[in-house]
Amino acid sequence: MTETALVLFSGGQDSATCLAWALDRFDRVETIGFDYGQRHRVELACRAAFRDRLVAEFPAWGARLGEDHTLALDALGALSETAMTRQTEIAFAADGLPNTFVPGRNLLFFTFAAALAYRRGLRHIVGGMCETDYSGYPDCRDDTIKALQVALNLGMDRRFVLHTPLMWIDKAATWRLAHDLGGDVLVDLLREDTHTCYLGERSRRHPWGYGCGTCPACDLRAKGWERFVAA
Ligand code: ZN
């Protein structure tokens, strides 16, 4: 049986690692990205470059990599009054959530992804959600994803399987997973051609890649890298 998958691919480190994970496992893999006016739109620009280099460096994966889809979700940008889409400082609100949180974002992403997977006949849906260092995003929780899988399968009368390979590992282990999958070549590709910084900063290159170096996303990525290379 040919196993087919759709990867939620933003152009960031986590989803790029998930793409490699999926290509290692499934016979045919397509990707989907969402444009909702996020401030770190440079992530979206990284997507094509990362896919191209992945195909060039890993021909066996390239043979399995199918179409890329991008969906404009203007409504999400319009709904969210957050630092992700407005020029405000990233800070932590009283409820402990960073104001980068776009409410329900991953619920919407998975729902749109499932609708596309339905149309494309894809069974597995893969996302980089992680409960280990998730900044308190409730839609990254394992229970949320499991509940959503049930809801989507009931609502669309399909047997989708939602995968979150990073759910229980930290950022150091995410670098390690990439190394296990594709060695130094994949790790270098992730450093050079993915983007995680909330501010969209790409003029400064650190050992772990590009970014401002101080926002919560850069901080997580940098600390994970330090633990990965120290191990
Ligand atoms: Zn940053």
Image: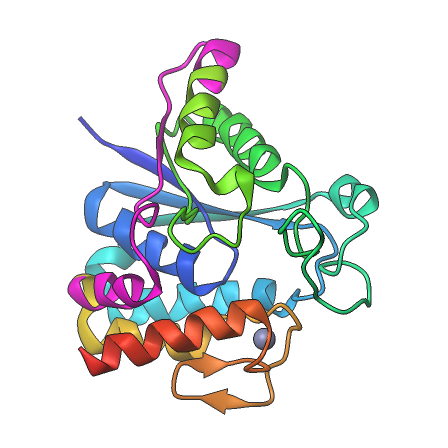
Residue at 42% across, 29% down: 143
Image quadrant occupied by the N terminus? top left
Point out residue 151 in the picture as x, y percentages from the top left corner.
49, 16
Residue at 19% across, 61% down: 181
Residue at 62% across, 68% down: 198
Tell me if residue 175 is in the magenta stretch: yes
Q: Quadrant of residue 111?
A: top right
Q: Which span of residues is magenta-colored?
A: 152-180
Q: How many marks?
A: 0
Between residue 228 and residue 185, name the one nearer to us: 228
Q: Is residue 171 left or right of residue 140?
A: left
Give the colouring mode of the picture: rainbow
Q: Residue furthest front?
A: 94
Residue at 44% across, 31% down: 145
Point out residue 97 in the picture as x, y percentages from the top left corner.
63, 51
Judged from the image, the quadrant occupied by ligand 1 is bottom right
Between residue 154 and residue 87, name the one nearer to us: 87
Between residue 89 and residue 50, name the one nearer to us: 89
Q: Quadrant of residue 44?
A: bottom right
Between residue 118 and residue 38, name the one nearer to us: 38
* Position of 181 relative to 189 (above/below): above
Tell me if residue 168 is in the magenta stretch: yes
Image quadrant occupied by the C terminus? bottom left
Point out residue 30 in the picture as x, y percentages from the top left corner.
41, 44
* Position of 98 relative to 158 (above/below): below
Q: Is residue 188 at all visible to an observer of this figure?
A: no
Q: Is residue 8 at all visible to an observer of this figure?
A: yes
Point out residue 40 in the picture as x, y percentages from the top left corner.
65, 66
Q: Quadrant of residue 183?
A: bottom left
